[in-house]
């Protein structure tokens, strides 16, 4: 059995080698087809991976926890109008949510003018946060170093600036160790963030300044932006009164209640030591586990906020699932399209094989007659020609895999297209090329086996 | 001992009005170890008879016992097996595989023989046969680099590889000059002396004279069957003209 298989393969190889140029040209169709399949699948896989990475860089795995909605007399004031989130919430989330969350950072937002020398600018994002924010956003530093937890505890006036700020304030020169003034407070620039570009809705993410949240909250903002809303304008911030500069540059929020005197302040100390933050950023461990991450955040926050069952959440969680799905679907459609084209070229290659095999059967009619005369059965002839077709296709497939891999390497090196080696592509193309060999080789082989030995021997 | 026993073999081609009777009732017995020459005019049915004897074709009617076995009722696969075990063919146009060495050509029928011979034993046997036909110095030559006589000797070695009992040669010297023909015939006689039964078709009286028995066919029937080697003149070679050879 083994030896007869061995003999069949050897005979087929000899027959193919007898006309090596034609065998090579025949198999070219399969080579091109398989190379196309491999190339497109590797490119498809690479670009979908690249798309995923891009999405991730734009914050795909990010979750934003916003304070709940304030409502008064049936009038809802929109999300973030109630101050329910605290820095402590963020700390608890990062401690208890480790199974789904990579990192958590509280953010205090404000919007104010910054000044350096004779230039000034209002950054889109002026965030007070913790060093973990860079983890959450997967953000690296171009130069310098990040502020520390120590800086956060001491409310040190240091900051990191984004590329747009560097361009606008520093004319593109290195801002390290410069001192900028944020709302008239001096902040030392200790690091520069790498450029991130625009986010999914087109807002420049590099127009940013990051500083310890304590410094922003107690020395710059005075008030959280949420306080702009009158209904929620609760003064919980003592730094405001102590900071004399704020008297000269009054806060935008109107005072609904008369300012407390120092005596009153001393007599009624703030019982609630919790410090509010405007939003908590978190990063899930993987894109797939986002729903679970959201559930867990919800549980932890409800527990921490002591919400009874039936009471609505006093926060809400946003993620980027829809954008992810949309981008993923696009690259998938493109990949399938390319693959379809590649498979069509494989089929064309198969038709080429069939054509040449038919020619070969006609040309070798005498040989077939001779083989029958010396004792070959119809099955032997069928098997031999089928083996030839399959070997052609398999060799073509192997060559095609090599060419396809080479092609995708060339694409990566010279065109910088993202490609990724793909085992399924190789398995699929080997299977398909064998199938092509069987399907398109069968008819010529069958035709050969039906020849009449006497007629075949006499064939000129 | 009888090797071949034909009784009333008929072969018709076509059907209805176009029906053509090529063999009209041939009865024939050939003993083991005979060297038989088959002669006759072109179109008299020699090749048709040889095809039947070689189990390449089936008669329309009649019985054919080969080695005591009725072969007309065998399936085509069984006939193929029989051909590979008992029959060797030598053709007028040699029919070697192109771009294939003499050795590989000789080994080719072994692929279908299901013999007990191992690869190495088969190779040894092929080399021995090539030596026997005087081609030990041309083992790796391809047909394109050999003369007609050498090609025919490769074909004879090929026909012997599976150790047949019957060698059928249809005009084996038809494409060769008289000197080379002489060589081939000497080879046949040598093989015949070692026990092989040989039937050869020829148009050439001098070729036929090398056989111990000459069968003359005419119009689908056996007209004459002569066993005396030393009286070739008993046969009237009227119709056996060399220029009729294709
Ligand atoms: N396949 C076929 N179909 C129809 N008629 C055939 C077929 N094969 C042979 N014949 C006819 O049978 C007759 C005998 O043919 P055959 O080949 O046996 O002659 P032959 O004696 O070998 O002649 P030659 O000496 O020329 O080789 C011829 O008239 C031929 O036309
Ligand atoms: Mg003939």
Image (spheres, coloured by chain):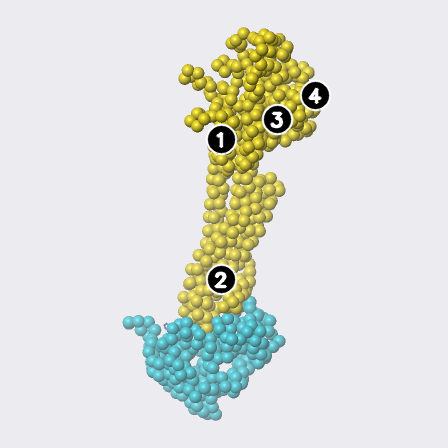
Chain colours: A yellow, B cyan
Q: Position of residue A381 (x, y in %)?
A: 45, 66
Q: Nearer the viewer, mark 3 or mark 2?
A: 3
Q: What chain does mark 1 sit on?
A: A
The answer to whether the beta carbon of the residue marked 4 is less than 8 Å from any atom of ligand 1 is no
The answer to whether the beta carbon of the residue marked 3 is less than 8 Å from any atom of ligand 1 is no
Q: Position of residue B86 (x, y in %)?
A: 46, 79
The residue pinned by badge 4 equals A178
Question: Label 3 crowding class (10 Å Cα cut-off): few <14, some 14-19, many 20+?
Answer: many
Mark 2 element type: helix
Of the two numbered discs 1 and 3 on the same chain, state the one appearing first in sequence: 3
Q: Are marks 4 and 2 on the same chain?
A: yes
Question: Label 4 crowding class (10 Å Cα cut-off): few <14, some 14-19, many 20+?
Answer: some
Q: Are marks 1 and 3 on the same chain?
A: yes
The residue pinned by badge 2 equals A387
Q: Residue at x 54, y 83 (%)?
A: B187
The residue pinned by badge 1 equals A299
Residue B85's place in the image compared with A86, above or below, is below
Q: Position of residue B162 (x, y in %)?
A: 50, 77
Q: Are marks 4 and 3 on the same chain?
A: yes
Q: Residue at x 54, y 47 (%)?
A: A422
Of the two numbered discs 1 and 2 on the same chain, state the one appearing first in sequence: 1
- Residue B14 horizontal side relative to residue A448, left or right: left
Gap in Å between the C-alphas at discs 1 and 4? 44 Å
């Amino acid at each position: 059995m083994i030896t007869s298989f061995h003999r069949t393969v050897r005979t087929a190889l000899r027959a193919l080698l007898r006309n090596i140029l034609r065998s090579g040209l025949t198999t070219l169709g399969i080579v091109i087809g398989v190379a196309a399949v491999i190339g497109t699948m590797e490119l498809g896989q690479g670009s979908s991976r690249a798309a995923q990475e891009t999405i991730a860089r734009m914050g795909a795995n990010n979750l934003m926890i916003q304070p709940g909605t304030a409502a008064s007399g049936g009038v809802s004031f929109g999300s973030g109008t109630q101050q329910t989130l605290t820095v402590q919430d963020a700390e608890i989330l990062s401690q208890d949510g480790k199974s789904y969350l990579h990192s958590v950072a509280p953010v205090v937002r404000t919007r104010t003018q910054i000044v350096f020398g004779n230039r000034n600018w209002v950054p889109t994002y002026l965030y007070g946060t913790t060093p973990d924010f860079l983890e959450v956003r997967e953000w690296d530093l171009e130069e310098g170093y990040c502020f520390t937890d120590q800086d956060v505890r001491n409310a040190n006036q240091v900051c990191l600036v984004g590329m747009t700020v560097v361009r606008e304030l520093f004319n593109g020169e290195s801002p390290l160790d410069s001192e900028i003034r944020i709302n008239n407070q001096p902040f030392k620039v200790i690091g520069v963030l790498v450029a991130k570009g625009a986010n999914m809705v087109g807002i420049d993410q590099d127009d940013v300044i990051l500083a310890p949240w304590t410094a922003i909250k107690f020395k710059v903002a005075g008030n959280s932006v949420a306080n702009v809303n009158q209904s929620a304008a609760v003064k919980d911030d003592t730094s405001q009164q102590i900071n004399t500069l704020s008297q000269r540059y009054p806060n935008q929020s109107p005072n609904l209640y008369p300012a407390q005197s120092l005596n009153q302040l001393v007599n009624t100390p703030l019982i609630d030591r919790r410090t509010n933050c405007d939003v908590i950023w978190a990063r899930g461990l993987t894109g797939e586990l986002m729903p679970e991450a959201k559930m867990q955040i919800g549980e932890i926050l409800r527990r921490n906020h002591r919400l009874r069952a039936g009471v609505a959440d006093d926060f809400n969680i946003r993620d980027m699932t829809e954008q992810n799905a949309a981008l993923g679907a696009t690259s998938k459609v493109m990949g399938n399209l390319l693959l379809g084209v590649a498979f069509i070229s494989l089929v064309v290659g198969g038709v080429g094989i069939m054509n040449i095999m038919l020619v070969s059967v006609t040309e070798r009619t005498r040989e077939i007659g001779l083989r029958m005369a010396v004792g070959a059965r119809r099955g032997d002839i069928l098997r031999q020609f089928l083996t030839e077709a399959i070997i052609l296709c398999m060799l073509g497939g192997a060559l095609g895999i090599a060419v396809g891999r080479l092609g995708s390497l060339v694409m990566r090196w010279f065109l910088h297209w993202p490609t990724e080696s793909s085992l399924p592509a190789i398995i699929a193309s080997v299977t398909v090329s064998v199938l092509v060999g069987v399907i398109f080789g069968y008819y010529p082989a069958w035709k050969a086996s039906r020849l009449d030995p006497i007629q075949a021997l006499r064939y000129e | 001992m009888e090797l071949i026993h034909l009784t009333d073999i008929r072969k018709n081609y076509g059907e209805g009005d176009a029906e053509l009777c090529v063999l009209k009732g041939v009865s024939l017995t050939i003993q083991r170890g005979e060297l038989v020459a088959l002669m006759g005019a072109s179109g008299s049915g020699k090749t048709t008879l040889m095809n039947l004897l070689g189990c390449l074709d089936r008669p329309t009617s009649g019985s054919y016992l080969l080695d005591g076995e009725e072969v007309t009722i065998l399936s085509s696969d069984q006939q193929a097996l029989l051909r590979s075990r008992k029959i060797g063919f030598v053709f007028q146009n040699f029919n070697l595989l192109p771009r294939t060495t003499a050795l590989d050509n000789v080994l080719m029928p072994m692929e279908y023989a299901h013999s007990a011979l191992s690869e190495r034993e088969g190779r040894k046997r092929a080399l021995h046969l090539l030596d026997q036909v005087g081609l030990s110095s041309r083992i790796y030559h391809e047909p394109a680099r050999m003369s007609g006589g050498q090609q025919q000797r490769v074909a004879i070695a090929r026909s012997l590889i599976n150790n047949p009992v019957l060698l059928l040669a249809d005009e084996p010297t038809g494409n060769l000059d008289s000197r080379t023909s002489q060589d081939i015939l000497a080879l046949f006689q040598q093989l015949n002396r070692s026990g092989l039964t040989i039937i050869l078709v020829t148009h050439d009286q001098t070729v036929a004279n090398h056989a111990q028995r000459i069968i003359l066919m005419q119009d689908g029937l056996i007209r004459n069957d002569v066993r005396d080697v030393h009286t070739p003149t008993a046969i009237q070679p009227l119709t056996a003209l060399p220029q009729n050879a294709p």
